[in-house]
Amino acid sequence: MKKLSTKIWGIITLFLVLTILFMYVLTDYLYEQLYVEDTQTSLIEVGEKLRTQYQGGKVTDDFIAEVENFNAYSNFDVFAVRNPRELSACVPFEIDYDALIGPEERQQLLQGESVTNIGYEQRFERQIISVILPLTDQNRLEGILYMYYPLAKISELANQEALFLICCAILFSCVLGFFVYKGIRHIMQPLNELQHAVEQMSDGDYKARVPVSTKDEIGKLSEAFNEMAAAIEHEDEAQKNFLATVSHELRTPISYVKGYSEAISQNFIGEKEKQEAMKVIAREANRMEQLTNELLELARTSNEQQIELYPIVLAETVREVIHLLNSKATNKKIHITTMLEEQIIVLGNEEKLKQIVINVIENAIHYSNEGSNVSILTKITKGNAVLEIADTGIGIPANDLPHITERFYRVNKARSRADGGSGLGLAIVEKLVKMHKGNLTITSEVGIGTTVCVTIPLMEE
Amino acid sequence: MKKVYLFILFIIALLAGCNKIEFSPIDHHHSFVASVNILQPSITFYDASKKLIAKWELDKAYTGAELIGQDQIILYGHQLDEAKIFQLSTGRQVGYIETGIGTTNAYYDKEEKLLFLTNSERNSVISYDSQFEELKELKLRNYPMSMASNNGSLYVVNYKDTILSVIDIATLTVKDEWTIDKSSNGVLILPEMNQLWIGGHGEGSKPNQTIDVLDLETGKVINQLQASIMPIGFSRNENTIYVTNHGSNELCAFTVQGELLWKTEVGANPFVVTTFQDELVVAGYDDHTIYYLSGQSIQKSIETEKGPFQLLVREV
């Protein structure tokens, strides 16, 4: 398959050659129209004036001498002819002589018309413009006035220099073709780089980027490619991290379970510690269960593009969740205050909406200090229902805030079991909120607390 | 039933008619001058009172014609491969000759009642009998054309050669070859002077201005008469020889001794002159006009069709 650059180059070169040909034809036409026609008109004018000197009857020696005399000072070559042999008088008899005028021209002259010829004339061995005027008397062609002007000025020059001109045209085309080729290569370079980068990407090298040197379409395409490559690379990185995190998260409880169970089976620990070990095994098993449940949930929300939405009373859902989590809050001596608007009806999926509220309130309880307060507020802002859950907990540093909804992202990088979370909660919340065509914003200040704000569209009336 | 027969008869007549082209018939009793016009091929017939009695418009590029006896005319063309013979009194075609292209001239010898055609492709002369059957073909020199006969001899001018062939009519063999100028055209035999006059166009760019007088026996040039420019058309009456000079549009009159009597301008590019009753008739090829002269003075001019090239005369 031919390369695009070769095609463009071919088209431009073709147009170039066509342009040269067109210019040649145009020049020829203009030459014909202007130069030749002008000369013809001049010749006829001069001839007509000279012809007034012919008085009729035989063409006399005096007249011929007069024409010769004029010829000596004229720009044109002019002569008078009276020899009937030259005038094709013998036709229809065959003539063995190349007469100055042919039979058709003779007929034309007999009608009193002038004859104009442009072309090569054997007798003068050159290209000429000739005008022949008849000298007639009583239908007799007594003679002619023959005037001619060589076409040497342009055409002979062109004939002599034809090779030179053709060479010039070819050379000019070659040079232009070369520069066009270079220019196209220059223009096409980013496309080639792009093609190379795409090939790299398809081979699995997601670090491939193209330099953006222009602001044209190709430049924009390169930029878009770079953005796409960055996104793919980021996604790939996230995928790898996710896998690493999942295996890591699972390995820790497994090693607990494995260690304690082996210790029990080989009687390395006493009866009293055995109870403790069993508790640890049960706790870690719960953690694994929770983790796999959340992973399952996340996978499900990722696969589910659309969920069924229907009107739900938001306050009701919030209350149900508070009821569910009441024991947890009580354990930590956390007081939950609510300010719920009963009229708010949102378009939602009950199960998913509940999941959102559970995750957010669980987090609030989890990261709040003992004896502190969690306040839950619902309101309507700009046609949307807003659920605001504020705690006075440890807060999130500003650096971590943008990443807080990423999977397995935890502010505490040490992944201590003490703060417990799997790092999937907010990621699930974000996806579920998106499914509700809503919005999730988190504001926080370290040591003061965090406010999670979920905005969901109201049911349209 | 009768109607059907009539219809069939009509169809047969129509088909027969298609085969033989018909022209206006010319009565036996009419004397005429016929102008053979070749630019737009036609023949125009004028009677003794100079009235147009018939116009034959020809559908082919005929370049010449010749009367055969009093009632037949042969039409030939240099680029046509067939010559046709028509009967004047009926206007019907009575015969044809497959000539092949290249026919330059036709000559009918009234004494021998033989027709001769010259051909420039085959460079020969061919003789035909009164039934237009080919008798014999004789190879000649380059481009045989002008012909005249006298006393059992046929004189043929080879137009693109420098030779005049003298042919024995009885055997159709070359008796003698005489040296003449190239592009010679127009011959006239003066038996009483034992002379043959020959004109011509001239060679190359130089126009001929003389008439060579040859001894009829030996072919030697015995005199050279100064005419005007390009004397090629000859005619005579008892005492005077008339010659058209087509290069200078002049008609010259000579005595049989070769003495120039007069010359006068007539027509435009006149190729041919003939005598008809008491008048001279000249055809101007360029001005498409036929001139009737009495002596030097033009009596009447008649515009004819384009390109009158030959004049044929029948006097009854």
Image (cartoon, coloured by chain):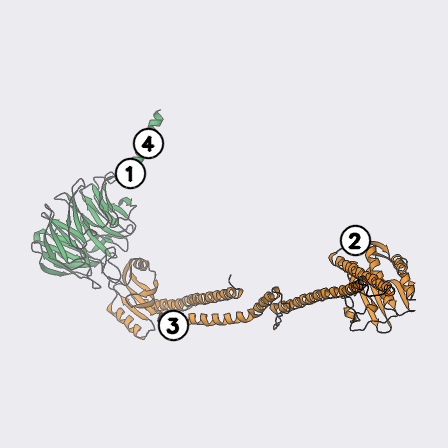
Q: Nearer the viewer, mark 4 or mark 1?
A: 1
Q: Which residue is mark 3?
A: A164
Subunit of label 2: A
Q: Which residue is mark 4?
A: B10
Subunit of label 1: B
The answer as to whether the residues below labels 4 and 3 share one chain is no
Chain part drawn in magenta: B26-30
Callout 2 secondary element = loop
Q: Nearer the viewer, mark 2 or mark 4?
A: 2
Cα distance between the residues tagged 2 and 1: 103 Å
The answer as to whether the residues below labels 2 and 1 share one chain is no
Cα distance between the residues tagged 4 and 1: 14 Å
Callout 4 secondary element = helix
Which is more N-terminal, label 3 or label 2?
3
Q: Which residue is mark 1?
A: B19
Query: Which residue extends farthest front?
Result: A267
Name the amino acid, label 1: Asn
Q: Nearer the viewer, mark 1 or mark 3?
A: 3
Work out whether residue A253 can be spotted: yes
Q: Quadrant of residue B136?
A: top left
Work out whether residue A437 can be spotted: no
Q: Which residue is mark 2?
A: A308
